Structure formats: C-alpha cells, structure tokens
C-alpha cells in the first residue's frame, strides 16, 4: 500500500491490520473513559453497547483506504498552578491546559495503534529510571499498573538513591509545557528506531498530526491512555543520557530527579542536559526547577508524611488497587451516571463491608496546618470518602468549590454521592447555573446532577438554558442537552427538538442519545428523523437497540 500522505485519507495493509486487537482496545477505552477530562455519556454508550459496529466502521474505512482522522473535542481545563497575587495569601487566577477526547473511530484506532506499540516501547523504557505508566499485562484492560504502585515505586527509588553517601543534593527538573512541546516527527523517528513497524508508525503520525488540526508538528493530546504511553516514551532517550552519565536518576512523566554530589556537579550536568533536551524540542520550566539537599527530598512536612502513611496503611487491607486506583496528586475516576450497559434488571444489591477511615479523616482534618498541600490531601481523601459514603468533607468541598476550579471533577464526583440532602442539592444546582464558573466546572456539576433522584423542572430549565447558550462550549452544551433529554417533560423535549437544528453534530448526537429515555412514539420519531445524520448517529442507533 502507498505511503501515507499527511492530511489525506489512508488505509493499511490487511496483514498489518489483522494483527491489531480491536477487542482489547475497546476494553481499554471503556477503562480509560472513567477519568476523561470531558464527560461524554453519549460517546461512552457507543463504546459500551456498539463496540462491534464501531470496529466494523473502522475496518471498513481502513480497507477502503478512506480513514480520515478528525479534530478532537477540546476545552480549557483549569490547572492547580495559580498566578500569585503579590503581598497576599489570596489565590490568583488559575492557569489552564487543553483537555481533550476523541470521537469514537479516532479513539479506537489511536488506542489500537498504541496497543501495537507496547512491545517496542516496553523494551525501550528503563524501568529502573522511569516510573509513570508502567505497562500492565499485555491483555489487561487497564493498560497500566495502578498509579498507586507506580508512585510508590518512584518513592522507593528516590529513597534508595538518596542513601548513596556520595549524593548530597537532588536536582529536581520539570519540563515546560511538556505534552504540547513533543515533536511528532521526532517521536515517530524514535519509535521507528526502536523497531516499531512503519505500517503502524506512519498511520500514527498521520493521526497525531490531524489531532493538531494540521496546524503544527508538535503536541499530543493529554489525558488518554495512548498519549500517556507516548508521553512517557518520548523521554526515554533522556533517561539513557543520564544512565550514560552514570547518575542516579528517576522520572515520573516529565518530572526528573537527578542525584548529585554538589551544586557544581549539577551545573556541569545541566550544561549537557539542557542542549540534549533542546534537541527534542524540550526546555525546562524555570519556575519549577530547583536543587535541594537530599535530606529534604521526602519532607513536604514530616508530620504530614506520617499522616499520609497512616492513611495508606489503613486502607491497604480494605481496598484493592483494582477497585480503587487513586493517590494524592492523581486524576480521580468518574463513575458512570447509569449502569445500563450491565443491565439494570440483572443487577443485584451487594452489601459492602464498611470502610474504616479514621486515619484518613485525621489526615483530611489536618489539611489547614500544611499550606500548599491542600489538593494533595483532597485528591487522596475525597475518593475514599465517596467510596465509603462518608459526608465528612461536604462542608469543606462546598467552601472550596469556587476557589479551586482544578478540583471540579473530583469535587463534583464526591458531592454527587450526597444529593439526597436538599441543601446540598440546591447548592450544586446553584453552582451549575453560575455563569462565572468555567464551562469545565459546570460540565461536571451537571454530571453530578444526573445522579440525583427525581430532577425538578427548575433543574431541567437550568440545563436547557445552558444547552441553548451558543457562547458555551460544546462539551458543556452536550451534557446539558443530554440531561434535558433524559429528565425533561414533553415541553422540555419539544424545546430540545427545536434546538437540534441549531447545534453542532456533537451536541446533536447527545440529544439523539437522550431520546432512548423518551416515550415510545417520540423515541421512534427521533430515530426516523435523526438516525441518518452521520456515523456518530448510526453507531448510537445500534447502541440504543440493546
């Protein structure tokens, strides 16, 4: 088959395509969507219920030589890092990054290509130096080992390296704008040099370039399994450079720890390392790089470390990594707003063993004593409180919601557990209506509202107003429209049908997906009118049959 030309449709040799395990890729996507930056229940429905049809659609395009990658759905996601306000402890505006998801065909092929690369990438990574996104078994739906294990392995490595009597300091380095700086040509060249078959790498390059909107040869998406894999791999040559220098080092994605015997030693290392990074189009984040005595490596605060350890020990025997994979500093999984793909009638009530969280509560209650560590504590504790059904942190989250926009996904996931409380429900609904909040925050608030029982018409009206607002991001409008379609009465559904012609195909698909909750005649009319409005609608039609 002819070489792939960037920006043009492509296919793949049948023998190469036959080696791709699309079934495994679907399973990994279903695992991955739990922590997506963007909530898209209508797309999750396709992965859960129309996987075979999705595989057939990708296969048909590939065989015809007509696979055409599209543009991701991307929105601004607030970061934890804030602009400082001089002479005050007040939190300034949040920086943001682009959070993205892919439409189903693109996501499936991207995942499948990444799956084919794992054997090559696994051999290229130095697991004694690189600790993030360690590959799980080749047939594991999770793709990576738990973040808790990866993080703990990093901490163990750091502790071991610090024991070297010749080491006095640790050079902590952070790469500036890492994912958006990755040179796609360089990434593909390194993959090819590592033994990745060109049949796959050329298609991967075409997809990655398409995801930038053909604007650039730099940058990969953040927050989905394939990008996690490729982002970790891109720094592998830097690990080898440090190994050749005979240095102790450890890396977690783009965070580097290099152990040195003196400040002068660090200076000599940087003279070589900075040009090496530049050759990969990478540069250091000057505001986050520093040299610290090795004795301070594990001392964010000695007492706080002890509290964290007590909490970790407390839950270690109560929760498996497979059931709960969160650690402070990591994205929390969002639970699906329904479990229909499992069959509601087939679900049985399972009495869960109560979780003891005394140490976790002590850790959480100590948070104010350790300024700067609040989000670390929250990211660790809140998912545990949610799993245990503990409202211990509700008042704290209510107070912090507006002040910490980067935590909206975790905050909303937690508050969703307690919306039977009328005051809390009113608070969440009020936030969803607040136009001062970022669209990303409001999207997760509406996702939380979906888990409340018996939505009121006032709540549906708030979602409808958002869906109608052309100034709002499509990701927010789609979730709002889905909410209206699922919970609105006939009059609200009529408004939604009128809105359909005025919105993007992505929002239209969300409206169509919500029609599965409509009365019989309305549902059939929606199918007759909208089912032919593109590939997304065709896949949803199949998904809604089940």
Image (spheres, rainbow, N blue to C red):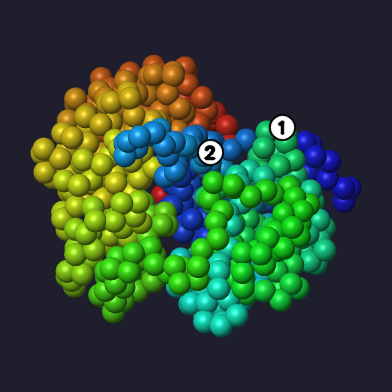
Give the secondary structure at mark 1: loop
Residue that appears at 54% across and 46% down = 287
In front here: 523 or 102? Answer: 102
Residue 58 is situated, as x and y percent measured from the top left of the image, at 65, 48
The quadrant in which residue 310 appears is bottom left
Mark 1 Cα within 10 Å, few/some/many (few <14, many 20+)?
few
Any part of residue 121 in sight: no
Mark 2 Cα within 10 Å, few/some/many (few <14, many 20+)?
some
Residue 397: assigned label: none
Residue 99 is situated, as x and y percent measured from the top left of the image, at 51, 41
Label tally: 2
The quadrant in which residue 273 appears is bottom right
- Report which residue position mark 1 lands on: 215
Going from N to C along the chain, the mark reached first, 1 or 2, is 2
Residue that appears at 70% across and 38% down = 210
Q: Is residue 425 left or right of residue 487?
A: left
Residue 530 position (above or below residue 494): below
Q: Is residue 250 left or right of residue 370?
A: right
Residue 229 position (above or below residue 494): below
In front here: 70 or 443? Answer: 443
Residue 26 is situated, as x and y percent measured from the top left of the image, at 54, 57
Give the secondary structure at mark 2: strand
Residue 499 is situated, as x and y percent measured from the top left of the image, at 40, 18
Q: Is residue 394 left or right of residue 378?
A: left
- Report which residue position mark 2 lands on: 98
Residue 44 position (above or below residue 389): above
């Amino acid at each position: 088959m002819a070489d792939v030309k960037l920006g043009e449709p492509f296919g793949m040799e049948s023998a190469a395509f036959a080696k791709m395990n699309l079934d495994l890729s679907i399973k990994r996507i279903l695992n991955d969507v739990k922590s997506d930056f963007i909530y898209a229940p209508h797309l999750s429905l396709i992965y859960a219920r129309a996987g075979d049809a999705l595989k057939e659609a990708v296969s048909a395009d590939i065989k015809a030589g007509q696979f055409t990658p599209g543009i991701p759905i991307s929105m601004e996601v607030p970061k934890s890092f804030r602009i400082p306000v001089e002479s005050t402890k007040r939190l300034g505006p949040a920086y943001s990054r682009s959070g993205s998801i892919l439409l189903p065909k693109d996501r499936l092929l991207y995942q499948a290509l990444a799956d084919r690369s794992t054997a090559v990438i696994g051999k290229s990574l130095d697991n004694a130096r690189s600790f993030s996104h360690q590959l799980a078994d080749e047939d594991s739906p999770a793709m990576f080992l738990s973040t808790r294990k990866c993080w703990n392995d990093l901490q163990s490595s750091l502790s071991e390296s610090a024991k070297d009597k010749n080491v006095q300091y640790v050079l902590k380095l952070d790469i500036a704008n890492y994912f958006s700086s990755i040179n796609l040509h360089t990434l593909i060249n390194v993959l090819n040099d590592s033994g990745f078959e060109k049949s796959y790498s050329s298609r991967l390059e075409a997809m990655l370039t398409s995801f930038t909107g053909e604007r650039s040869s730099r940058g990969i998406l953040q927050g989905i399994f394939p990008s996690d894999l490729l982002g970790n791999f891109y720094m592998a040559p830097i690990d080898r450079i440090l190994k050749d220098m005979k240095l102790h080092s450890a890396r977690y994605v783009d965070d580097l720890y290099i152990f040195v015997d003196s400040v002068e030693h660090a200076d000599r290392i940087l003279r070589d390392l900075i040009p090496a990074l530049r050759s990969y189009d990478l540069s250091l984040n000057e505001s986050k790089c520093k040299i610290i005595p090795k004795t301070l490596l594990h001392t964010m605060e000695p007492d706080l470390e002890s509290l964290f350890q007590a909490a970790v020990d407390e839950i270690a025997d109560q929760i498996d990594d497979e059931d709960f994979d969160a650690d402070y500093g990591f994205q929390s999984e969002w639970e699906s707003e329904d479990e229909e793909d499992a069959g509601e009638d087939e679900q049985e009530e399972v009495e869960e063993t109560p979780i003891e969280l005394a140490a976790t509560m002590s850790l959480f209650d100590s948070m104010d004593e350790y300024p700067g560590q609040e989000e670390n504590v929250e990211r660790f504790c809140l998912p545990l409180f949610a799993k245990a059904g503990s409202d211990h942190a509700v008042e704290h989250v209510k107070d912090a919601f507006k002040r910490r926009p980067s935590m909206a996904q975790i905050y909303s996931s937690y508050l969703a557990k307690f919306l039977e409380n009328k005051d809390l429900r009113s608070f969440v609904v009020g936030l969803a209506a607040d136009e001062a909040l970022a669209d990303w925050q409001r999207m997760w608030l509406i996702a939380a509202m979906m888990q409340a029982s018996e939505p009121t018409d006032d709540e549906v009206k708030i979602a409808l107003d958002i869906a109608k607002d052309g100034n709002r991001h499509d990701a927010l409008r789609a979730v709002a429209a889905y909410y209206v379609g699922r919970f609105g009465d006939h009059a609200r559904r009529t408004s939604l049908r009128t809105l359909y012609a005025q919105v993007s195909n992505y929002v239209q698909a969300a409206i169509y997906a919500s029609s599965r909750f409509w009365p019989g005649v309305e549902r059939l009319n929606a199918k007759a009118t909208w089912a032919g409005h593109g590939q997304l609608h065709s896949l949803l039609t199949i998904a809604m049959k089940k």
